[in-house]
Image (cartoon, grey):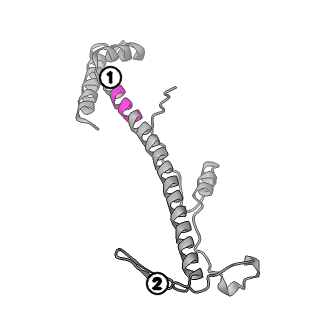
Amino acid sequence: MSQGLQHSLAEHEYLRHRLRAEFPEADEETLRDTLEGVSSLPEMLACALRSYLEDIALIAALGIRIDEMQERITRFEQRAEKKRAVITSVMERADLKKLTEPDFTVSLRATPPALVVTNETDIPHDFWKPQPPKLDRQGLTAALRRGERVPGATLSNGQSTISVRTR
């Protein structure tokens, strides 16, 4: 928490305590209205919230930009792979095993045959690896929320959060 916000909160709590002590008959709405007029806390919270909203907007914008750049990387990777395939094909057809230039040397070499799976269901069990079990967190949470008792798991106490509408 920023120092300014901490100071405003301390001031707000002090003023609320003093107002309750001096005006015990005051209702909550009157107390709230009075505090709003004399405390800088609402303005400080509004400022912090605006900064929060700017951060959320930047996160969204950067996410979009990263997605666009990832698409660009994919296009470059595809373009590079096409060039590699063309170079390989031309070197094979020309029976050119090696090309030496001042800045690089390229050699044509054979690769071992790659695996091609035509039908997984026909493959014997000896070639399948068992996978370790994975906790179904969503299912476990749903069961606990329905009131089921599940040994080794429980729901935490809820916490407060803020809901911000900007439209």
| Category of crowding for the residue at label 2, using alpha-carbon neighbours closer than 10 angstroms: few (below 14), some (14–19), many (at least 20) | few
Image position of 137 with respect to 13: above or below: below
Q: In this view of the protein, which residue sits in the foreground, 104 or 156?
A: 104
- Total marks placed: 2
Image position of 51 with respect to 142: above or below: above
- Magenta segment: 46-53
Which residue does the image show at 56% across and 72% down from the upper left? Answer: 85
Mark closer to the observer (2, 1): 2
Element carrying mark 1: helix
Element carrying mark 2: strand
Magenta stretch encompasses residue 50: yes
Report which quarter residue 52 is drawn in: top left
Magenta stretch encompasses residue 58: no
What is the residue that sits farthest to the front in this orientation? Answer: 94
Identify residue type, mark 2. Lys
Q: Is residue 130 left or right of residue 70?
A: right
Q: Position of residue 87 (x, y in %)?
A: 53, 73
Report which quarter residue 53 is drawn in: top left
The dot on residue 9 is none
Q: In this view, does 148 lie to the left or right of 51?
A: right
Which sits earlier in the primary sequence, circle 2 or circle 1? 1
Q: Is residue 97 left or right of residue 6?
A: right
Q: In this view, does 74 lie to the left or right of 58?
A: right
Q: Where is residue 74 in the image (x, y as percent from the top left)?
A: 52, 58
Q: Circle 1 sits on which residue?
A: 43
Identify residue type, mark 1. Glu
Q: Where is residue 29 in the image (x, y as percent from the top left)?
A: 42, 15
Which residue does the image show at 53% across and 55% down from the upper left? Answer: 154
The dot on residue 98 is 2
